[in-house]
Amino acid sequence: MVDTYRQQGNPVDERTPALDLPLPHLLNDTRDDVPRLRAALGLIDAAHKLLADNKADKSALQAFALATADAMEASEQAAANEVAELAAQLATQTQQLGKQITDMGKALEAKRIDLQAVAAASTAAQARAGSVAERRLRQAHINTSNAPTGVLQPGTEYSVYAPAWTEGWTLPAAPQIGDQIVLLDSWNTWGLRTFAVKRGEASHHINNRAEDVRFNLDVWRVTLTYVWTDKWTLSIG
């Protein structure tokens, strides 16, 4: 502390070393020290308030930091859970796809035809067996009583139930030369009503006639063959 002795009517100005606050002195009059003490207490009060505010700000910052950390941790956990769920879904889908591929492979293996063995057949029975298996593999069959409308597909036999046949069945619009379609009168119903097979394109001809073909007789089997550009042939049997 600094002592300054009273001289010429002036108060002794003694202060604290840290905050430089005025202190009362024995040589001073009360009227000299009271304003100085009030000023010192005001400074102390202001310093205390500032310290309290800083402490509150620090606590608030700490709470905010903790909340931010918790939120980040929760977000990271949610992201990790989502990734784990997606990974599980992907694993399930991959397993299902693998099973489908395996089943498909088994189906293909069951239907596989060893054409080389057929060609090398040494007996008529072996040749017939190979030929029948090969034909079954490539020839589809559709019952029109269950599917009464659609586009006729090459390489397919159709058992035509005339009472259920609609005008919706048409020949392919863009066939390839050599395509064949077979119609079968499996129920002997073609003579019961007239039904038609429509051309896929207006430019197509059937047996050199630019019109749709209509059936009203029992013929048992009809073969349609695309033989040239815009040319279909229709043969019985």
Image (tube, rainbow, N blue to C red):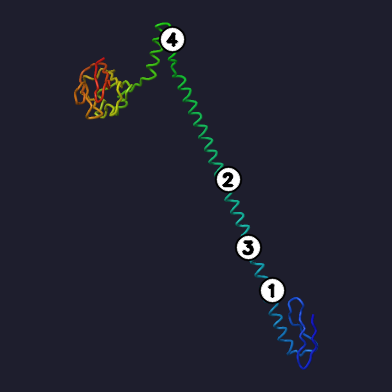
**Disc on the earlier residue, 2 or 4:** 2
Q: Residues within 10 Å of mark 2 (few under 14, many from 20)?
A: few
Residue type (three-letter) at the residue carrying disc 1: His
Residue mark closest to the camera, 4 vs 3: 4
The residue wearing badge 3 is 61
State the CA–CA distance, disc 4 to disc 3: 89 Å
**Disc on the earlier residue, 4 or 3:** 3
The residue wearing badge 2 is 80
Q: Point out which mark residue 48 bears.
A: 1
Secondary structure at badge 1 equals helix
Q: Position of residue 79 (x, y in %)?
A: 56, 47
Which sits in the foreground, 218 or 206? 206
State the CA–CA distance, disc 3 to disc 2: 28 Å
The residue wearing badge 4 is 120
State the CA–CA distance, disc 1 to disc 3: 20 Å
Residue type (three-letter) at the residue carrying disc 4: Ala
Asked if the residues shown at circle 2 and circle 4 are in contact, with their CB atoms under 8 angstroms apart, the answer is: no
Which sits in the foreground, 196 or 126? 126
Q: Is residue 158 visible?
A: no
Secondary structure at badge 4 equals loop
Residue at 74%, 82% (x, y): give it. 22
Residue type (three-letter) at the residue carrying disc 3: Leu
The correct choice, above or below, for 66 with respect to 12 in the image is above
**Disc on the earlier residue, 1 or 3:** 1
Q: Point out which mark residue 77 bears.
A: none
Residue at 80%, 88% (x, y): give it. 5
**Disc on the earlier residue, 4 or 1:** 1
